[in-house]
Amino acid sequence: MKSLFKGIGLTAAGFALGTTGMVASAQAEGEVNIYSYRQPELIKPLLDAFTAETGVKANVVFAKKGLGERMKAEGKNSPADVLLSVDIGRLQGAKDLGVTQPVVSDVINGNIPANLRDSEGHWFGLTTRARVIYASKDRVAQDSITYEELADPKWKGRLCTRSGQHVYSIGLIASMIAHKGEAETQKWLEAVRDNLARKPTGNDRAQVKSIFAGECDISLGNTYYMGKMQTNEKDPEQKDWAASVRILFPNTEGRGTHVNISGMVLAKNAPNKDNAVKLMEFLASDEAQAIYAAQNFEYPVEPGIAPSELVASWGSFKADEVSLNEIAAQRAKASELVDIVGFDNGPSS
């Protein structure tokens, strides 16, 4: 049988074959097929450890977008066993597309807290990333902040952020709805919009670059970008960006800092289901969680596993324990509010 991954390779469409080669067929004894939004180099150490422990070969296809839709289009012929993704939006999106199936595993449920997994077992968190404030070391004296405070007029013209419709932004806004309700969140979002230094643009690292350049004083961003900047040998100027800011963990004295996840789902039509569940249980294990901590500048979901030394150097924080099931339920409303207030149009005159 010809490979179902044939022709994917490295292409302009954004697909790249991952770390372990192509599958000879969708169903193959001793193999598991992974569709991944996580870059191959980030998950290679995990898959190498999994193969060494189990003897199961891991085949990976990487893409920046469209994998859930790809699985739906492939239907029963899909070779995918496991989907690895980032953000609750994409994980819940896969469930909503009908391309997942529930997993019942004492191993997984024992290691992953209930608020970081689907109540019906369709998705599971593997790492967390906090949505924090990057603050200029030179121009911001305070060492604590809340998300609510971003609406304070003292920040007018001093805040940078990426698009309000990006999945990272939607997650935060959805968490505000979960805690504050729709009406109060809309008022908050309007005030935050009016405090923007410019129209939302660029990614999280671009906001830190803007702080370094003096274009704004604070920005919203995910924690792991600090690690990416601090260790960037390819673009060493990013080390200077990182050195110009410090991380403030919002609401640490209250409900806690909003966290999102990277995670996994079992494909609805997984041809190698037993091996897929083996992989998922391994990824939830202490061993895999420790590898995540060392490699990806993220926080393990398993409470007993410490973050890496670099991640720990950013400080400790209290994580918001609201269930990501609730966050997922509020995402559509959060997206509506972004459009209603014209957030991506930037500050009003």
Image: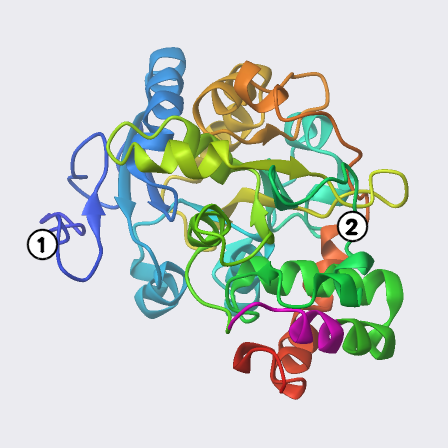
Which element is circle 1 on?
loop
Question: Mark 1 highlights which residue?
Answer: 7
Q: Main secondary structure of the magenta part?
A: helix
Q: Amino acid at mark 2?
A: Ser
Residue 27 visible, this angle: no
Q: Residues within 10 Å of mark 2 (few under 14, many from 20)?
A: some
Residue 309 position by quadrant: top right
Dot 2 or dot 1, earlier in sequence: 1
| 199 horizontally vs 189: left or right | left
Image: 111 above or below 186: above
Q: Is residue 190 magenta?
A: yes
Q: Amino acid at mark 1?
A: Gly
Which element is circle 2 on?
loop
Q: Residue at x 43, y 23 (%)?
A: 295
Residue 309 visible, this angle: yes
Q: Residue 206: x, y in percent?
A: 42, 53
Which one is closest to the eye, mark 2 or mark 1?
2
Question: Mark 2 highlights which residue?
Answer: 323
Q: Residue 150: x, y in percent?
A: 74, 60
| 204 horizontally vs 305: left or right | left
Q: Residues within 10 Å of mark 1 (few under 14, many from 20)?
A: few
Q: Residue at x 35, y 64 (%)?
A: 66
Image: 329 above or below 347: above
Q: Bounds of the magenta span? A: 189-198
Q: Residue at x 58, y 20 (%)?
A: 285
The one of 336 and 220 positioned closer to us in this rendering? 220
Q: Residue 306: x, y in percent?
A: 64, 16
| 292 horizontally vs 11: left or right | right
Q: Residue 81: x, y in percent?
A: 39, 45
Marks 2 and 1, how far apart at CA? 40 Å
